[in-house]
Image (spheres, grey):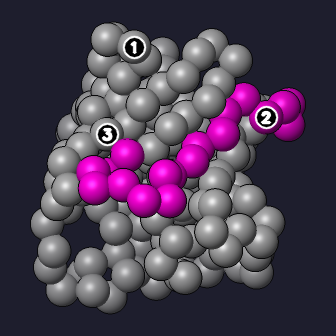
Amino acid sequence: MQLFVRNKIISLGGSSTVKDAQGNDVFKVKGNIMTVTKKKRVCDMNDNVLYTVRCRWLNPLAHKAYIYDADGNKIATIKRPFMSIKQKFFVTTDQGEIMVEGGFFSMHCLIKRGEEVLGAITRQALNLASFLGENYFMLEAADDANAAYLVALVIAIDNVVDDARGN
């Protein structure tokens, strides 16, 4: 399944839209106007919360984000190594470690659990919209059933990167 996650240039709270390859809305991502932890909720089209993503409170060096399920249980911790040549994120879940990794200047990362590829993330090339604060990702999910979770993972990684940059 191919999905497109777009953070809007002007948005109160960091809302996003998630569309499929045909341009149909698939998920809503809702942010809060004022939040230190960059809290966002991944919702279905009926506004039911599927996942909640938030950054760690006060993390000047160890940038982390968390994913919570619909019941509020923490199901994943996303960490970015302090010093790394590659784009790399470690995702700790109760089902094992997930690695998100790409090259040094990579706009493309693979999402893997062991040798199993769960999906791939491709970030847009730099353009005027990206300088104005818009982020645009293409997510290819290997399994449609994991699509919402992988959207939450993309949002969490984007939050970790923004947090590391001081945004």
Residue depicted at 36% across the width and 55% down the height: 84
Residue depicted at 47% across the width and 33% down the height: 150
| Label pair 3/1, CB-CB below 8 angstroms | no
Using a 10 Å C-alpha cutoff, classify the residue at mark 3 as few (fewer than 14 neighbours), some (14 to 19) or many (20 or more).
some
Residue wearing tag 1: 114
The total number of labels drawn is: 3
- The x and y percentages for residue 93 are 65, 24
Residue 110: quarter of image: top left
Residue depicted at 53% across the width and 82% down the height: 167
Residue type pointed to by label 1: Gly
Q: Secondary structure at mark 1?
A: loop
Residue depicted at 32% across the width and 11% down the height: 115
Query: What quarter of the picture does the N terminus occupy?
Result: top left
Q: Nearer the viewer, residue 116 or 21?
A: 116
- The x and y percentages for residue 82 are 50, 59
- Circle nearer the N terminus (3, 1): 3
- The x and y percentages for residue 50 are 68, 34
Q: CA distance from mark 2 to mark 3?
A: 23 Å
Q: Is residue 4 magenta?
A: no
Residue wearing tag 2: 74
Query: Against 66, is 119 above or below?
Result: above
- The x and y percentages for residue 165 are 47, 78
User: What is the span of residues highlighted in magenta in the rendered image?
Assistant: 71-88
- Circle nearer the N terminus (2, 3): 2
Using a 10 Å C-alpha cutoff, classify the residue at mark 1 as few (fewer than 14 neighbours), some (14 to 19) or many (20 or more).
few
Residue type pointed to by label 3: Glu
- Circle nearer the N terminus (1, 2): 2
Q: Is residue 79 magenta?
A: yes
Which mark is in front, 2 or 3?
3
Relative placement, left or right, of 43 versus 128 is right
The circle drawn on residue 101 is 3
